[in-house]
Amino acid sequence: MQANRLLLERVGELEARLGKNSRNSSKPPSSDGLSKPAPRSLRTRSGRGPGKGKGDPGMRLEPVAVPDEVIEHVPTRCRGCGGDLAGAPVTARVVRQVFDLPPIRVRVSEHRAQCRACPSCAALTTASFPAMATAPTCYGPGVAALGTYLLARQHLPVARAGELLSDVLAVPVSSGYLASLPGRAGRLLAPFTDQVAAQIAAAPLAHFDETGARVVGKLSWVHVAATKHLTHYSLHQRRGRIGMDAAGILPTFTGISVHDGLSGYRQYPEHTHALCNAHHLRELAGIADSPNQGWASRMAALLVRWHRKVTAAAGDGRDRLAPAQLARLRRSYRKLVAEGKALNPPPARTGKRGRPKLGPALALLTRLETHEADVLRYARDFTVPFDNNQAERDIRMIKIQQKISGGWRTEHGATNFLAIRGYLSTARKHHQHPLTVLNDLFTGHPWMPQPHPT
């Protein structure tokens, strides 16, 4: 009987593993393959119709007050009698504005450094060239900015980026020049990266996440730390505490850290922790697919329902739920945890060394019970978000880069790419134009974020 029970547990575990996808686990959508699961949204009907709502701002091409060029179109013959309109008065104008690109070409600036002989000692002195003029012919910061933007922001391979620049600018841009840009940018971004890390470490709340990446053919980990206004990436061979310490933020951070259930984050007891409920909802969806696990779908509905209550209360100008509401939430929460634990008893000892595996359901229930305060922190403190989507959004494009390139050939190249992504992500959060800040970078004056008021 014991052997049969163990076999049944093993079969159930394997079936659950085969049934995992991006909807009911933390697996990325790219792992679903061609047999993608049917979408299952956690959102409910809002009662609004499709399209733009009444009173919402629309999106359209707005006319400008002062156009770059005005072209007058003059009628020559009357549409009624065919008479000549050469001297006829203008009674009105119908205006249409066409937004288009002018012919694109590079602008060549020739710098001439004069050599002058001193009238007193006859010594020759040559004027200094600006920093951008590094050779008899060279590209300026604008071309470097656009090339870096195509590589790091738009994820183009070097060869295709060179082809695009050559086609658009009508000037050949070599692959070697483009391949050198991330290294130049990475060296110039060292002060920016340090400043962003210091600002996140001093923030009252920050999001943390990590994802695997192939570097020199081996598995490494990209760690992200983010706020609404800042993004910082770091690379390390380790996923846990050692890699987190190397990023230089979590060891000195004392605010609220929002993260998933990875145990490494628990090694910072001085933090106030908040767990990502988007992860919980995905895990609960996977467990609810199993028979006799109705508590999971009810727990998911409970978390979402109270998230809506928090959002509504915050919209009314409140900063917390009433004590009676919080007590009701805790009672419902604990009741569902108890129901789940009754349906998922601890596994029997097998005689093997170490603790037996709990299984997905019991592992989640244990986390929900042990870290109840961190799961429900969003309901007690309205400054705490319901999920860790900020970090997940900031790290998502790193996965896109991995899909395109398959990995980084050198650790140095990966570090440079991450520095540029952090620079562009932070600039976008501050509504800065990416090409402008990249141009500033290559002129030796990188844009720096000012400390944001908390």
Image: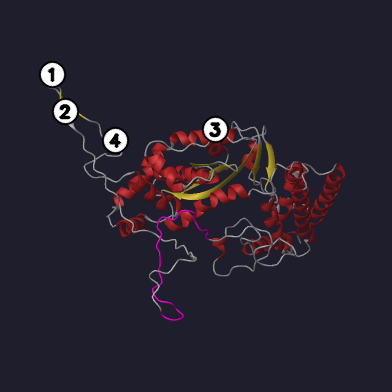
Residue sitting farthest toward the bottom:
81
Q: Is residue 178 left or right of residue 10?
A: left
For marks 3 and 4 on the same chain, the one whose residue lies earlier in the sequence: 4
Residue 291, visible in the rendered structure: yes
- What residue is shown with label 2? 116
| Left or right of 450 in this view: 330 | right
Q: Which residues are magenta?
A: 61-82
Q: Earlier in the sequence, mark 4 or mark 1?
A: 1
Where's residue 358, x and y in %?
71, 51
The amino acid beneath tag 2 is Arg
Which amino acid, by three-letter code, is at mark 1?
A: Cys
According to the image, label 3 marks what residue? 198
Alpha carbon distance from label 4 to label 1? 27 Å
Which of 414/91 is in front? 91
Q: Nearer the viewer, mark 4 or mark 1?
A: 1
Q: Mark 4 or 2, which is nearer the eye?
A: 2
Read off the residue under disc 4. Answer: 130
Marks 4/2: CA–CA distance: 18 Å
Say whether marks 4 and 1 touch (CB < 8 Å). Answer: no
Residue matched to label 1: 121
**SS label for mark 4:** loop
Residue under the point 40% across and 67% down: 73
Measured as percent of width and height from the top left, residue 118 is found at 15, 22
Judging from the image, what secondary structure is the residue with disc 3 in? helix
Structural crowding at the residue carrying mark 2, measured as other residues with C-alpha within 10 Å and reported as few (<14), some (14–19) or many (≥20): few
Quarter of the figure that contains the C terminus: top right
Instruction: Give the mark nearest the N terminus, 3 or 2.
Output: 2
- Residue occupying image coordinates x 36% and y 41%: 184
